[in-house]
Image (cartoon, rainbow, N blue to C red):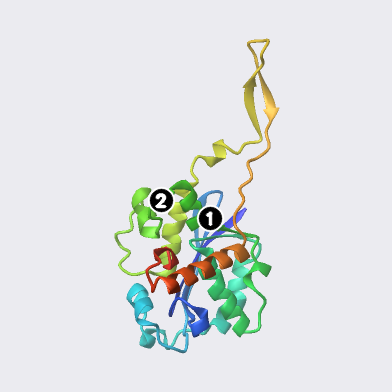
């Protein structure tokens, strides 16, 4: 299976306010190895970034002015993603923005092109309940060097998330095997027995979207005090 770690940077947090993607980065994983193959573009969003977003990524309007618009890279992006499994930290955010960009250029949603999505934020919350599960926190937890991450960057963050994902899932192959050994009750021998692979069930994108909308309602009612509604990366 071919995996692609995906990350985006945007002009703000909400497509409802006309925010756009300003950077997209993907890195390829095959046979649990980062292959070095990437897809990366800065994009001209035809608008300024909101102050909070600019503080995160540091991409100025002037820097992005001569970069391609999303419509110019859409075909190449979809071809690169085709039939792969996407690994994303807080998938509802990135996929929501990419679907918005695709809609603006008259294209079908991203789900028509990828095989499935693994949300590392949900996975991290299952593995480390009650702990901070931002990308920086996970890098610290798994001993991944992120000292060069002074700003958020789509390609840089995708590479870091790839390392985090491999560290988070290391050893799971030992739990998901085609056969295992069990001891017979009446002999001193061992026999092989088929074992069904463990099934991992992830929330659907619709469920993730409903969850995000609920967080936004809580954030509004609490006058911006809902920490869970902030982007966890």
**Image spot of residue 93 (x, y percent):** 51, 69
Residue closer to the observer: 100 or 214? 214
Q: Is residue 3 above or below residue 50?
A: above
Looking at the image, the residue that sits furthest to the front is 221
Helix, strand or loop status at disc 2: loop
Looking at the rendered image, the disc whose residue lies closer to the viewer, 2 or 1, is 2
Looking at the image, the residue that sits furthest to the right is 194
Residue closer to the observer: 130 or 185? 130
Using the rendered view, name the quadrant where residue 136 is placed.
bottom left
**Image spot of residue 148 (x, y percent):** 30, 62
**Image spot of residue 122 (x, y percent):** 51, 55
Please state if 162 lies on the left or on the right of 80 as rendered: left
Please state if 148 lies on the left or on the right of 135 as rendered: left
Judging by the rendered image, the residue that carries numbered circle 1 is 29
- For disc 2, the neighbor class at 10 Å (few under 14, some 14 to 19, many from 20) is few
Looking at the image, the residue that sits furthest to the top is 187
Judging by the rendered image, the residue that carries numbered circle 2 is 130
Point out the image quarter for the C terminus. bottom left
């Amino acid at each position: 299976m071919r995996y692609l770690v995906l990350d985006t940077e945007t002009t703000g947090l909400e497509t409802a306010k006309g925010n756009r993607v300003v950077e997209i980065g993907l890195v390829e994983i095959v046979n649990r190895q980062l292959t070095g193959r990437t897809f990366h573009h800065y994009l001209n969003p035809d608008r300024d970034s909101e102050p909070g977003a600019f503080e995160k990524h540091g991409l100025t309007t002037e820097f992005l002015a001569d970069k391609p618009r999303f419509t110019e890279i859409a075909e190449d992006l979809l071809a690169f993603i085709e039939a792969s499994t996407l690994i994303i930290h807080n998938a509802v955010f990135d996929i929501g923005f990419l679907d918005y960009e695709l809609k603006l250029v008259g294209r079908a949603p991203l789900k028509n092109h990828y095989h499935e999505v693994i949300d590392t934020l949900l996975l991290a919350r299952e593995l480390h309940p009650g702990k901070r599960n931002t990308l920086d926190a996970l890098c610290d937890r798994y001993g991944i060097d992120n000292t060069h991450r002074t700003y958020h960057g789509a390609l840089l963050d995708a590479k870091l998330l790839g390392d985090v994902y491999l560290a988070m899932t290391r050893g799971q192959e030992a739990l998901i095997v085609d056969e295992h050994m069990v001891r017979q009750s009446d002999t001193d021998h061992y026999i092989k027995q088929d074992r069904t692979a463990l099934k991992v069930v992830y929330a659907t994108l619709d469920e993730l979207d409903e969850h995000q909308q609920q967080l936004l309602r809580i954030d509004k009612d609490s006058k911006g005090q809902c920490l869970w509604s902030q982007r966890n990366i």
